[in-house]
Image (cartoon, helix red, strand yellow):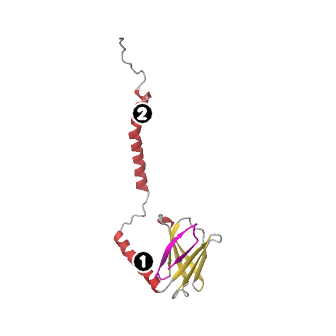
Amino acid sequence: MSYRPPREDVEPWYRQFWPWALISLPAMAVVGGIITYILAATTADPLVVDDYYKEGLAINQDLDREHKARDLGIKGDVQFDPSANEFRVVLTGKEVERLPYIDLALVHPTRAGEDEIIRLPSVGAGIFALHHGAPANVRWHVQLTPPDGSWKLQGRLPLPAQHRIQLG
């Protein structure tokens, strides 16, 4: 049996594969943590409400306004014509013929910055219309309110799959 002396590496450690493979794993974790921290610190989270108690009270007031619309027998037909970029709302019920305008709120399901309130002027007895740019293709939460805000109708309009919704 012949004796072999142990092999010595002649390359320095920084030119070998295994030290870099072992260093890269914790380095990637540190970089990922820094990216996560930057995203968390600079991106707002609009879905979290600071004062949830006041929001709960506001929800109860909204329900009262929906009940008032039902008691008045108010029903709405909201249409968006993509070829003419026009919103048209037809309301039926008590006191809707004499409204000068109606507010149509398009509420984005996740991004509060994309919410929009469109004031539709009256073009006839209970008919409100306005040419407006096309909204983004999402499932909008639609809310109709009169000038005094005494009642409210709401529903969902999934654009572009559907261009019409019945409320009430």
Q: Looking at numbered disc 1 in the image, what kind of residue is underneath it? A: Asp
User: Which residue is pictured at 40% across the width and 40% down the height?
Assistant: 27
- Residue range corresponding to the magenta coloring: 147-168
- The picture places residue 128, in percent across and down from the top left corner, at 58, 80
Mark number, residue 20: 2
User: Which residue is pictured at 57% across the width and 84% down the height?
Assistant: 126
Q: Looking at numbered disc 2 in the image, what kind of residue is underneath it? A: Trp
- The picture places residue 151, in percent across and down from the top left corner, at 46, 82
- The picture places residue 25, in percent across and down from the top left corner, at 40, 39
Element assignment for label 1: helix
Point out the residue furthest to the left here: 53
- The picture places residue 166, in percent across and down from the top left corner, at 54, 77
| Quarter of the image that includes the N terminus | top left
Mark number, residue 62: 1
Instruction: Verify whether residue 105 appears in magenta.
Output: no
**Mark 1 closeness class: few <14, some 14–19, many ≥20 residues within 10 Å:** some
Element assignment for label 2: helix
User: Which residue is pictured at 42% across the width and 42% down the height?
Assistant: 28
Q: Could you say which is closer to the camera, residue 29 or residue 41? A: 29
